[in-house]
Image (tube, rainbow, N blue to C red):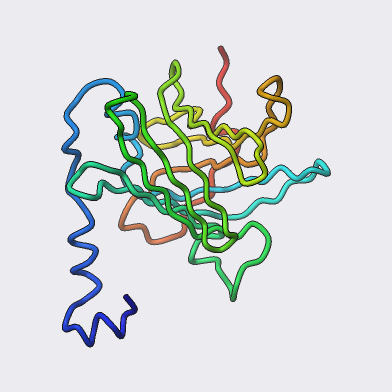
């Protein structure tokens, strides 16, 4: 429904958003049900696309995570470049998409659907915790295996890697990284974008 249609129906977009959003989870506590809890909120980020020729494309990004559908699912928006930096219609690397994450108790995992209308991308994955990471696996439109990993999530930062395998999981290549920092509101100046240095850790 367009904004004009909302107006003609005597409704407001805010009523749709109010019906969609939920204040918290209704899944209960424990285990896999809570693996995405720490992501709820808004984030500013730098996205790094690792190109096939060895070069990198870097741009700003923003992400927003919220409980929806009576607290039974999480929906998130991934936008790159960030809205403050979008001029006209971005070309390469354009993302203005949404993820719906729904917990499935029959497999004790999350069923994930990512849609980016800007590029026509549509991926379905399954997400689970593996050690300290959140690992989401599936395939892309070309049949390549994909692995999207929240490598590290802290209250203030997270590191996400998008990897592909073209040899049946014998090797993986990182195509994209998001380096995110939680947005603090209100803020008077744009947040400095995170860099890889924020995630260097000696083990």
Q: In this view, does 123 lie above or below 155?
A: below
Which image quadrant is residue 187 in? bottom left
Total labels drawn = 0
The residue at the point 63 percent across, 42 percent down is 176
Out of 9 and 155, give the one closest to the viewer.
Answer: 9
Horizontally, residue 145 falls left or right of residue 32, namely right
Q: Image point 41% across, 22% down: which residue?
A: 129
Q: Where is residue 32 in the image (x, y as percent from the top left)?
A: 31, 24
For the view shown, which residue lies furthest in the top direction? 203
Residue 135 position in % (x across, y down): 48, 27
Asked if residue 5 is positioned above or below residue 67 in the image, the reply reads below
**Residue 156 spot, x, y in % from top left:** 39, 37
* Horizontal side of residue 109 vs 21, given as left or right: right
Q: Which residue is drawn at 38% across and 61% down?
A: 188
Residue at the spot x=48%, y=57% of the render? 97
Q: Which of 21/196 is in front?
A: 21
Q: Which of 192 and 131 is in front in this view?
A: 131
Quadrant where the C terminus is found in the figure:
top right
């Amino acid at each position: 429904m367009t904004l004009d249609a909302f107006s003609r129906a005597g409704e407001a977009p805010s009523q749709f958003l109010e019906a969609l959003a939920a204040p918290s989870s209704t899944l209960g506590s424990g285990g896999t049900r809570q693996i995405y809890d720490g992501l709820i909120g808004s984030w500013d980020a730098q996205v790094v696309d690792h190109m096939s020729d060895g070069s990198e494309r870097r741009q700003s990004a923003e992400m927003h995570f919220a409980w929806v559908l009576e607290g039974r699912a999480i929906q998130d928006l991934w936008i790159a470049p960030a809205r403050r930096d979008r001029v006209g219609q971005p070309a390469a690397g354009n993302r203005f998409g949404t993820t719906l994450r729904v917990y499935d108790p029959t497999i004790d995992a999350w069923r994930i659907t990512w849609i980016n209308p800007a590029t026509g991308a549509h991926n379905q994955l399954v997400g689970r915790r593996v050690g300290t990471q959140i690992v989401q696996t599936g395939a892309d439109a070309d049949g390549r295996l994909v692995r999207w990993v929240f490598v590290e999530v802290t209250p203030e930062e997270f590191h996400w890697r998008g990897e592909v395998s073209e040899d049946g999981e014998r090797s993986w290549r990182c195509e994209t990284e998001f380096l995110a920092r939680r947005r603090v509101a209100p803020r008077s100046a744009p947040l400095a974008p995170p860099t890889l240095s924020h995630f260097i850790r000696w083990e």
